[in-house]
Amino acid sequence: MSKMKLKLMLAGVVVACAFGGNAMKFAWATPSLDFTGILVAGPVLLDEVDIKGKSDTEEVKIKTKGLWTSRVMHFTIAPGGHTGWHSHPGPVFVMITAGTLTLEHSDGTSAVYPAGTGFVEDPYRVHIARNQSATEGLELDAFILIPIDAPVRIDEDDPTL
C-alpha cells in the first residue's frame, strides 16, 4: 500500500472516530420529558452589575464582570415529566409557582421545592428537575443570567449510567 493511501485511510479513521465520539455524546444526553418553556422577557443585554444591600438580618451581593444576557422563562412539567440532565453557564434563579419540584444533582444530592419556594442553580452544576407527582402539574419561573453568546442550556450525560 502506498504512503498516500495509508495517510488517506488514517485520516478517514480519525474523522470517523471524531464523528462517532460526537454521536455517542448526543446518544448519552438525556432529553426532557413533558417539559415546555415559554419566553416571558428577553433576551436582554446587561452591563456590569454591582449590587449590595442589607437589612438588620439579611445581606445580598451580586456582581458581574463584562456583558451578560438575561431572560425570564416560564416552564411547565407535566406529571412524571423532567427537564433531562443539563447545566447552565450562569446562575438561574428559580421560583416554583405550582406543584412540587424535585431537584437532583449529579453528585447524588437532591432537594424538594413546593410552590412558594425557590433556589438558585449554580453555573455548570449538572442537574435534573422532576415532577414526581402522578396527577399535579408543575410550574416555575426562572430568571436566567448567562455570559453573552453562551448557550442557555447545556445538555449533559446521565451521570447514573
Image: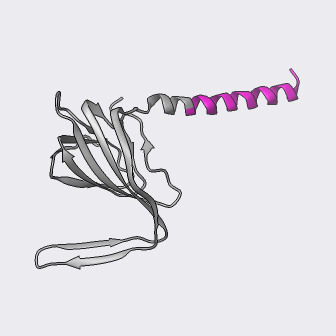
Q: Quadrant of the C terminus?
A: top left
In this rendering, position of residue 11 left or right of residue 74: right
Residue at far front of view:
40
The quadrant where residue 86 appears: top left
In this rendering, position of residue 129 left or right of residue 146: left
Q: In which quarter of the image is the N terminus?
A: top right
12 vs 152: above or below = above
The quadrant where residue 110 appears: top left
Q: Which residue is drawn at 21% across and 35% down?
A: 137
Q: Is residue 78 magenta?
A: no
Q: Which residue is drawn at 44% across and 30% down?
A: 28
Q: Position of residue 6 (x, y in %)?
A: 81, 26
Question: Which residues are the magenta region?
Answer: 1-22
87 vs 135: above or below = below
Q: Position of residue 103 (x, y in %)?
A: 24, 43
Q: Where is residue 31 in the image (x, y as percent from the top left)?
A: 40, 32
